[in-house]
Amino acid sequence: MLEFKELEITDKDLVNRYLEKCGRRNCESNFSTIFNWGGALGTKLALTEGTLLLSFERNGDVLFYPPLGEHVNKAVQQTIDYAKQQGKGLQFVTLSEAMAGELCEEFPEFSSECNEDDSDYVYLAEKLQTLSGKKLHGKRNHISRFEKTYAYEFSLIGPADYDACLEINYEWCRQNGSCASESAQNELCAIRRCFANFEQLDVTGGILRVDGKPIAFTVGSRLYPGSDTYNIHFEKALDGYEGAYPAINKYFANTLPENIVFINREEDMGVPGLRKAKQSYRPEFLEPKYRLRYRG
């Protein structure tokens, strides 16, 4: 019988040891991502014979992130037994194509699907830092107009900026009429959790001010120790400041360590405006994520 505990900040080193071995570039291969959203999702952790399992529940199903470790098939069988004992459905989410194929071959009771809305956008860090080339000419123009129009200041986020970033998020929600939605509340919970554990999570971020007023922030972290990919967790900019998004995107990208090769800016969730914005930066590739549903 699997025994679960609540995922805690003190589990960071343990989870990172397993994530380092997976070598993927999806945003869920990152302790900060899992932990930040873990409060809203109720994420739990279990260890079974050298395999790490992370799970949460939604709409009567138990959802598991990819099992990480030495005895994956045995762990998957345990999750099947666990879900049956709990009287719940079972899904595995954010799997690589290879793992999804291997598990479906071993366990034909699973069906596999891949929704492009869930795919992460991955960019070359150098391209986001320089915005060179004809295809990104428009981004450079937006930033140029921003810099000519506003008296701005960009700086890295420190403890004195946490409240200002939260206020930007509140104002952004008000501007977009989304304060009461479940997704906005879950994201607010994740952002609060991130700032409450900012230093322990090893995240970094940037804040943009115009005439001294905080108008945009972004936060991210290296996927796991040794990874060449940096993941952007949150990015918000207030309406009324043309060019704020491309400006903070570029300014922050230029603060990243030299050994960061890729930047993961996560999925578009099928939102047309978000998809257009992410595609406009010309991703190097999309990182697909597969979902398995148990049909037994």
Image (cartoon, grey):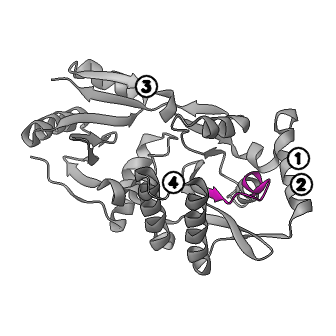
Quarter of the image with the C terminus is top left
Identify which amino acid the numbered label 4 is placed on: Ser
Residue 244 magenta-highlighted: yes
Image: 24 above or below 11: above
Specify few, some or many for label 1: CA neighbours under 10 Å numbering under 14, 14-19, or 20 or more. few
Mark nearer the viewer, 4 or 1: 4
Span shown in magenta:
236-247
* Label whose residue precedes the other's in the sequence (4 or 1): 1
Which residue does the image show at 30% across and 40% down from the upper left? 67
Measuring from the top left, give residue 81's x and y in whole percent: 11, 36
Measuring from the top left, give residue 84's x and y in whole percent: 10, 36
Left or right, residue 81 beside residue 18: left
Element type at marker 1? helix
Front-most of residues 181 and 281? 181
Q: Which mark is residue 114?
A: 3
Specify few, some or many for label 4: CA neighbours under 10 Å numbering under 14, 14-19, or 20 or more. some
Q: Which mark is residue 178?
A: 4
Residue 132 seen anywhere in this rendered image of the structure: no
Element type at marker 3? strand
- Label 2 to label 3: alpha-carbon separation: 40 Å
Q: Which mark is residue 141?
A: 1
Left or right, residue 130 beside residue 19: right
Identify which amino acid the numbered label 2 is placed on: Arg
Left or right, residue 190 beside residue 79: right
